[in-house]
Image (spheres, grey):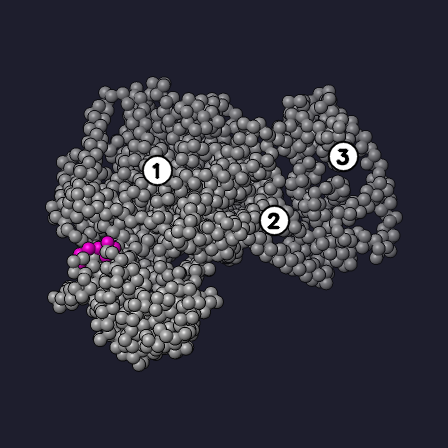
Amino acid sequence: MLLNVNNLSVSFGGVHALNLDHFSLRDKELRVIIGPNGAGKSTFLDIICGKTKADKGEITFNGKPILGKTEVKIAEAGIGRKFQKPSVFPGLTVYDNLLLAAKMKKDIFSSLFFKATPALAERIHAVATKLSLTTAMYKMAGDLSHGQKQWLEIAIVVLQDPTLMLIDEPAAGMSDEETEKTGALLLELSKAHSIIVIEHDMKFVEQIANELVTVLVRGKRLMEGTFAEVKNDQRVIDCYLGRTNAQLETL
Amino acid sequence: MRNAFLKHLPILLLGASALFSSCNNSSAKKAGASDSATTKETVKIGVLHSLSGTMAISEVSLRDAVQMAVDEINAKGGVLGKQIEPVIVDPASDWDLFAEKAKELLIDKKVSAVFGCWTSVSRKSVLPVFEQNNGLLFYPVQYEGEECSNSVIYTGATPNQQLIPAAEYLMSEKGGGYKKFYLLGTDYVFPRTANKILKAYLLSKGIPKENIIEEYTPFHHQDYQTIISKVKRFAADGKACILSTINGDSNVPFYKEFANQGLSSATCPIMAFSVAEDELRSMDTEFLVGHLAAWNYFQSNDLPENKKFVADFKAFCAKKGLPGGDKRVTDDPICWAYTGVYLWAKAAEKAGSFEVSKVRNALYSLDFTSPDGLVKMDPRNHHLAKPVVIGEIKPDGQFDIIWKSEGLVDPQPWSPLTSPDKDCDWVNHNGTYAKK
Amino acid sequence: MRTKTNPLYYILFIAFFAILLPAGYLSGFLSVNTISVWGRYFCFAIAALGIDLIWGYTGILSMCQAFFFCLGSYGIAMHLLLKKTVAAGAVLPDFMAWNKIETLPFFWQPFHSFGWSLVLCLLIPALFAFVVGFVLFRSRIKGVYMAIITQALTLAMWLIFLRNETNLGGTNGLTDFNTILGYNLSSSSVKLGLYMISFAVLCAAYFACYYITHSKFGKVLQAIRDSESRISYAAYKVVDYKLAVFVVAALLAAVGGMLYLPQTGIITPGRMDVKASVEMVMWVALGGRGNLKGAVLGALLVNFLYSICTSLFPDSWLFILGFLFVITVLYFDKGFMGLVESIRQRLANTRFKTPQTTL
Amino acid sequence: MKISLSFQQVGSGTNGKQTGIPPARELLQNRYTHAAKAMAGLLLLCTLLLLQQVAAAQDSATIYTTQVLSPSHDSVRTQAIGRLAALRIPATFPLLMAINDKKLYLLDHKAVTIDAKPTGEGTYRLYTLYPDNKLLTNSSGQPLLLPLSALQTVDIPRGDRLQLADIAPLLNLFSNDAQKRILAYSQLKNTGDTATLRILQAALAKESNADALRTGKDVLYAARLYSAGNATNAKAYIDSIGDNWSDNAPVLLRNYAKNNAFDKEVASYAAAKAVSLEKRYDQLQRVQNFFSGLSLGSILILIALGLSIVYGLAGIINMAHGEFLMIGAYTTYCTQLLFTNVLGIPQTDLFFLAALPISFVVAGAMGLVLERLVIRHLYAKPLESLLATWGVSLILIQTARLLFGDLTAVKTPQLLSGGWQVSPHLTLPYNRIFIIVLTLLMVLFTYLMLYRSRLGLQIRAVTQNRQMSACLGIETRRVAAITFFIGSGLAGLAGCAITLIGNVVPDMGQTYIVDSFLVVVTGGVGKLAGTIFSGLGIGFFTKISESFFQAVYGKVFILVFIMLFMQYKPKGLFPDKGRIAED
């Protein structure tokens, strides 16, 4: 197993945001996590990537514990994160955004005396092409459209070349066409990387969930199964309907 | 970016042309002044007092005093037949700017003498400038001594002309026979040096060490609760008084806290060395009444010269529409700033020249009837011999003169108490010299 | 940067200050006072470059640059004062003798040597910046917190330097020097020399900063400004980068201070009070943050205005300066350089990007 | 007999004013009547002898007094004053003192003197001088108030006055001014002269001021202690001194123990008493320190309160906040001028009461203007707002300087001057108590406004999410403007309060601005509880450190401490929790 999570819990001001007894992910698996708002999905990813400190529990990645490590250590270990709200560097060009992300030595002196190699430039262009960013290569990232920013952030994660990608709502704010393209891209990426995706859009989930889907509710794991199993589970339906969430009603 | 830089060019050139034009102006004036020193009818003096910033409140009054003296002298026909033209600049309470403006006055404007500075630090800042460029600075404020520059005429008090008589008075039967002394000051060089001298003096008079406490607060200190508690404890078991060198806006919270914690001038008087009439204008005097201050001049001095001076100053301020108008008061630094201009004019007349070295030589032993009576320049250095007075603060912000020295007190720039081996003499020696 | 800067403008700038002004002085048009005044402005501009690096590029508002500036100045001042003292045959500088200090405090000892003084002038601010930076950045203090804490730190240091017990001259600071390396400070040629050195150092500092900001290092800095979390998830050690740039900025400020001292002739704690530290940031804000040229021009322009206005409008120069600050921040987000840029863009009729405003 | 009678009166007189403490004399008489009886005969003899002298003196005093006021010749007056000084009759002291102080006047040919301080209208209360020293009243029983011009000044030449130098300390025992009396009592320390003690007792019999009484009794007991004939007496006096507990008591007892103790036992008794007094004093000192901390803390809170609200809501670092303080203070000054000069209301405390709401409104209105012109464009741009408001503060300071110059003395209201004497050696100044209470009220007001009103709900909503609140139909601009009004108004109120302890200068705001920012930052931005806790914390901490270090290092120490504290809590005492906290 690539990622193992046991008895993870965190609370904010007395409210249990997450209380996960077990979660595991094997190498090169694409896992989708769904759940109503406030289920603790993003918090879960936050804990894995070091943004939020867990109260207790254990997470191992590649057999090594990562809980309590800094974001940088975790990123260096091979975990990349895409946030729910696109998080890019608006004051830099798209190219620079990608350049910064690309896998290389990242200490001060290497940065100061860095010279771009043709191989690197090629790799950046390849990723940019894959995400339709070539035309915007020298635009400021802040000037991009929302969808483009989403892609740019995915591109940043891709260029980091992590073992595990944590992708938070990649399809939010995208047109159907773009969503589909994003799904295809994720499927392609899952051939080489392990991926955890959080998503609300059930159509999108259906597209990418070839393997297991985990359902989180109020910080707890409600169930885990294939998309078909999840879709037909009464508890899941109740849970969504009980919260009058329209998204599952379409199913 | 390249074009952006182009856009800056006009501004840059504008700045440059402004720079050049101002410099050309000054150099043209400079040339004119040197050519026509004997034919034109004016002589320039510099006025270097802060007109903005924290020191403005004190220093603006000195500018007014200098301006008034200049107007009076000009009305009487000027000096050596020339009208005095004051060049006023604003060093903005910025010590670095003092040095810059001093250079501007001496090098660019070629003034014959400069009247200015208040704080020690501003004087120290301009001192090298005056020494290197052979300028002459008239410095009107009481200061810490330990200085003997050939380029400064100190019309303010030296420590022995203010501190020692005050301490002596407090120890005397008449002054209350105080036995314990709390030396409290703002943390800068004047209080530090003043207290060093006071301490040496008190120790020499047999006051035991444990009966003298020295304490300093930062500038603009507002919270005197702890210190007043300490004073209270200190004053509890005997005749104690405070010698205060607290500066500026810290005084009000200090006096207020003092009164509110139940202390008073009867139980523990405060002798202040930095509170004069001009500062009292901005204070609620209620809490200060009955406390003491030592200076060389008070507005309440009833000499006829002084009555005229006070009336003239009020009239001058009213006429010029200065803030405060005829409600303005005179005080010690104002008196000496005013006297300084007259001393310079008299010396120039005596020397028959505005040349710095000649004026300086003419100043030795020069006497002048100031608002404070006849005062006399020291025969050997650049300080002024003058009377010392101690006053009690009245509710109207004026002082009741309760003690006055017999005759003039000679200045001692080097206090014999702390530097017994040093003296200042520009006639027989080269400034500070070691006494045998 | 999107367009390459035409070297012509650099050449013009250099020609103006390196040739025209000195020539003006040598031919008698300008007084030596003008030369040393501009020399002092260059020192401020050097410090401003540092502020632009840390604030404009990295987004950390450090209010203790004025303190680093003073550290540089004090170091050189201590050296000059000791030289003067030794030349006069004394052991202690005057002010210490008056304060009844018997022996030279230990931290004054190394300043007998010029070499050591230079080293310490750089080392002490760097070390200080390192320690403070480490403590602050490690606990992720940023934004407003950073600004307030560094301001408080400067205030604390100001209070300490004001003390006489610190043995650095208290409020009066250190003053009255006569020679530097045996050259007489009051001689005009030495003043011109110092002017030229300051200008050369300014140019060197500019190009060093130019290199830094255009390297990948500089991009990481901007990335930190834009999104600190993103860059740390991309495996950059943000603390290291911030520390590095904080130390570099401190060094630049110290260098500015070192050159400032012999041209001004006095250093007092007044150089690092609250007013002074905010003003330093203002130079960069007015010139245009995130733009090296802006920092230099801002520092030169504001100080030039300050000198002129205090002579011309003693009563109202504070209004002028105050309004300038407010208007710049309100309407010219990117300062003077940003204004020029936007005019150019409008004229060129390209797509004009409005400044981002919330609300 | 007369004298011993009066003696008795002194004892009971002092006793009455002292709560539940038997004075030494009573102890003496109860327990040791033998000794008293043995002495009685002797005492009677002495008294009879003295009585005669006194009666004669009284007569001559009247003659001399008349000679002083209407001398046939200057030399007669000189002689008369000399005689009066030599006689030392307490009844003549008020007259002699009036001479010494140059405050002798005639009103209808009667010698009178004036109060130390004039009343608000420049008139004085008057006292008769001889044979009795009483306040003059008019027909309705109110004190008679007259200006100096209504009185005829009696000029006594300096030479004549100098004759009084010897008895000047005694004269002050009968001064109208309590402070002078305290001084006079303390000057009698270490006196063993019976005649002087007699006068001292006479003065104490009349004493009305608690402090003066304490000092005087201290001197009296000390003299008795030193002349005590046996150990028990001495101990009783030591007890009295301890109970009286004047400022000087511990030192006095310690000196006695060291040098002049009756025997070893008494010495150790006195020393132990001194130690216990000092211990009690230290405890009171601790209370005083606590109060100082509380007072400083409440000032910080009062200033930081507005800052915290504004910063929390708008993300604005208002560097001009200190200047609103200044505006409040100047408003107070203007209100005072308005009351005295325009409305013609004489100096009363009324102006200050009016100034409180006025300064709130004026500073608030100025804040509103600032919000409209500048802040509006800077919401959620904290660093830019820092710079812009700095510029604003420069402008405001210079405006104040030009408008007011330096003529800005705010009178402290009579009600708030002085202090509350909780116990001997513990005075809590009224002005500081007032500020603490004001702070309490303002905190309460702010709490109610923020957490118990609709406006507060809206403010908190806007604080958390501006866009969302706007979507919900909250007029964010209006809410922001109101918040700014309240924030600036609170600063103005603080400025008004600060005139009680400090003075009014154009750059007064700068003194407080960094401190108040530290309070806000340490407390956690926009947190009311945080501001209160950190304000109090910094206040107490400053006062504690000030008692160990000098004031300057105390301040530096606080700053370093806060920096280290931020290591532990980088977002202040009360940080936001959960996911909204980040970015």
Where residue B39 sits in the image (x, y, percent)?
23, 20
Q: Which residue is mark 2?
A: D428
- Under circle 2, the secondary element is strand
Circle nearer the viewer, 1 or 2: 1
Same chain, labels 3 and 1 = no
Residue A138 on the magenta span: yes
The answer to the question of whether label 1 and label 2 lie on touching residues, with beta carbons closer than 8 A, is no
Q: Position of residue A33 (x, y in %)?
A: 34, 71
Label annotation for residue C187: none
Indicate the position of residue B108 as horizontal and vertical percent values: 24, 33
Q: Quadrant of the rendered structure where residue A118 is? A: bottom left
Dividing the picture into quarters, in which one does residue C325 lie? top left
Circles 3 and 1: CB atoms closer than 8 Å: no
- Left or right of D5 in this view: C300: left
Q: Which residues are magenta?
A: A137-143
Chain to which mark 2 belongs? D
Q: Nearer the viewer, residue C41 or A8?
A: A8
Q: Which of the numbered marks, if any, corresponds to residue D91?
A: 3
Q: Nearer the viewer, residue B59 or D463?
A: D463
Dividing the picture into quadrants, the one containing residue B428 is top left
Magenta-colored stretch includes residue B294: no
- Residue shown at 37%/22% (left/top)? B71
- Residue C318, disc: 1
Q: Amino acid at mark 1?
A: Leu
